[in-house]
Image (cartoon, grey):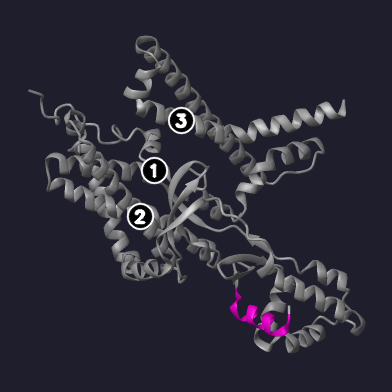
Amino acid sequence: MQNPELASLLQRLRLQTVDGVHQAELDGRHYRLPPRLHEAACVMKTQGPEQGFATLMQRWDVAATQQSALRAELWQALTALEQSEIKHGYIHAGVTVLPASVVQRLSARLLPLFGLPAVCAVLLAFALLLLDLIVFHSVGGSELRRMDLSAADWLLGYLFTCAVLLFHELGHATGLRAVGQIPQQIGFGFFLVFPVFYANVSNAWLVARRSRFIVNLGGIYFQLIGALLLYAAIAFTDGHVRAFLSLAFKANLAAACFVLIPFIRNDGYWLLSDCLGLPDLYQRAGGMCWVIFQRLRARVSISATEWFIAAYAVCNYSFLALVILGLGRSIYRNAAQFGEIIHAGGANTLLLEHPALLVSSGITLLMFGVFTRPIIWRAYQHVKLKSRSI
Amino acid sequence: MNSTDDLKKDLAAVELEQRFEMINATSESLDLVDITNFICSPKEDAAPKDN
């Protein structure tokens, strides 16, 4: 890379020290920098590549004979920030629902909701809502079960739910703005096989860990506001409108609980990751049980954090096992139903009269495949390796 | 005098993963917590009687 290109890269590079860790952002990608590289980037950014390099050589007390080799290393380390292969995110086939410019404008408008008086008011109102819900009302629970809901009611209920889920994402984006960073796009994509809405809040790496909690909890906080609005709307409506509002209300509260599960990169995962100060919790958890086993054998001491990560890994695997078990049971039930239908009316009946069952079975099988494929693949590799060594 | 080998070791950046705060967009997945009965199950005396 020539000097003008490096100078342009350095100008685009945002450098920050967060909780004692040096970090950098370049075109939406985030890095942890070792102290020397951070120092070099800071000096070269302010003084220009050549002048900055001369200053560094003096500061680091490097012999003249070694300077050219180190120059090449430094240039390579800095250009690698731009040229390294882009890490594919864990969300696939993502499409932008709200572009960054719209999210930034909306989050600026919603920012007052993160003021202390607003937060206190929302929490108090939600506590009263729960009290009212549990003690006095049923919020359409009985009506929903008795009512013959049409496809349009379900569709409207789902659309309202989607609106609330998008509001959840806006909560994260606004939370990021509340801690002084610019949010990026909100989109829709697939995590494993699950369709998800997501907010790109990667700039949260540039703020202190304590501030990241505001970003992590921003989504649930906005869902509480959504719950208050829906609850008020339910109180003033009746019939089918009330029914689909109730569907959205329940889905909203359930989703707010669901996102706290820390095993599938939900909000709960980022909360735990920030709590422990481990940005790569997921990767670490993968091999931690084996590391602990090796250390126990070698009688090496194990830190409390390592024990915790191992416990998290065990819970993670248990959660995975639970999901696989649930999917397996569902496949068994569907297969039994298939048998009954085919026995009673033939394969044509299954195709013509039970298309929904066929579709849901297909989805269940697909999900089962996605969850079990890595396990089967590892087992296959293990067996292959063993058979070769015999 | 600093050794360049030591300096070189201190120049490798680590990329952090992108932070996507996500939420499941299917109502089916919410069956995990049984949405039709979640929190809103009616009180026996509060539920209107069927005709």
Residue A183 percent coordinates (x, y): 45, 66
Q: Nearer the viewer, mark 3 or mark 2?
A: 3
Q: Nearer the viewer, mark 3 or mark 1?
A: 3
Q: Nearer the viewer, mark 2 or mark 1?
A: 2
Mark 2 or mark 1, earlier in chain: 2
Residue A25 in sight here: yes
Mark 3 or mark 1, earlier in chain: 1
Q: Which mark is residue A166?
A: 2
Left or right of A149 in this view: B17: right
Q: Residues within 10 Å of mark 2 (few under 14, many from 20)?
A: many
User: Can you identify the residue that label 3 sits on?
Assistant: A362
> Could you tell me which secondary element the residue under label 1 belongs to?
helix
- Same chain under badges 3 and 2? The reply is yes
Query: What secondary structure predominates along the stretch shown in magenta?
Result: helix
Taking the spot 61% from the left edge, 39% from the top edge, the residue there is A313
Residue A319 percent coordinates (x, y): 53, 34
User: Can you identify the residue that label 1 sits on?
Assistant: A257
Question: Residue most toward the left?
Answer: B51
Mark 3 or mark 2, earlier in chain: 2
Amino acid type, residue under disc 3 in the picture: Gly
Amino acid type, residue under disc 2 in the picture: Leu
Residue stretch rendered in magenta on the structure: A2-15
Residue A111 percent coordinates (x, y): 34, 68
Q: Residues within 10 Å of mark 3 (few under 14, many from 20)?
A: few
Q: Quadrant of residue A241?
A: top left
A96, A184: nearer the viewer: A96
* Depicted A166 relative to depicted A139: above or below: below
Amino acid type, residue under disc 1 in the picture: Cys
A162, A286: nearer the viewer: A162
Residue A107 is one of the magenta-drawn residues: no
Chain letter belonging to callout 2: A
Chain letter belonging to callout 3: A
